[in-house]
Amino acid sequence: KFIAFVTTEAETDQPEEDLKPGIDLLGSVNEKFYDMYDRFEPCNDHEVDGCFISTSYDPTTHFEITVKDVVGMYSKITGKHHFCLLFQILDLSVDLSAASATTEE
């Protein structure tokens, strides 16, 4: 069994119809769940009020736009303008030695 996400920005008042071409590509489907979310964008001026507000989640399933938004906010807050700064903030390294260690008898 697989779980599939089909997302889009609704262009009509019938989101099921907007998603139909993607759903049809899946073939036989056991269950379908539909949900809609409003998207919001900040309307304040962060230079005036010092408040940094992110946009709502986007329709991409891996949050590509959301990550860019967060990096953009970081750049506005710190004045540093480089995408790699995100990876300097987060420690994404993984020590696999414990996961791959096996006991030999």
Image (cartoon, rainbow, N blue to C red):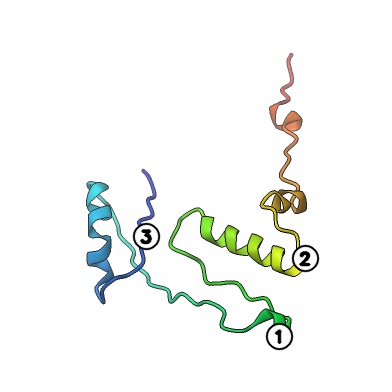
In the picture, the disc for residue 23 is: none
Q: Residue at x 70, y 58 (%)?
A: 81
Tell me which amino acid carries mark 3.
Answer: Thr
In the picture, the disc for residue 78 is: 2
User: Image quadrant for the N terminus?
Assistant: top left
Q: Position of residue 24 (x, y in %)?
A: 22, 52
Q: Nearer the viewer, residue 14 or 1?
A: 14
Q: Residue at x 37, y 60 (%)?
A: 7
| Up/down of 104 relative to 55, above or below | above
Tell me which amino acid carries mark 2.
Answer: Thr
> Mark 1 = which residue?
48
Tell me which amino acid carries mark 1.
Answer: Val
Q: Position of residue 11 (x, y in %)?
A: 29, 71
> Mark 3 = which residue?
7
Q: Position of residue 62 (x, y in %)?
A: 50, 53
| Up/down of 19 relative to 52, above or below | above
* Mark 3 touches mark 2? (CB < 8 Å): no
Q: Earlier in the sequence, mark 2 or mark 1?
A: 1
Question: Is 69 displayed left or right of 86 in the figure?
Answer: left
User: Image quadrant for the C terminus?
Assistant: top right
Alpha carbons under labels 1 and 3: distance apart: 35 Å
* Mark 2 touches mark 1? (CB < 8 Å): no
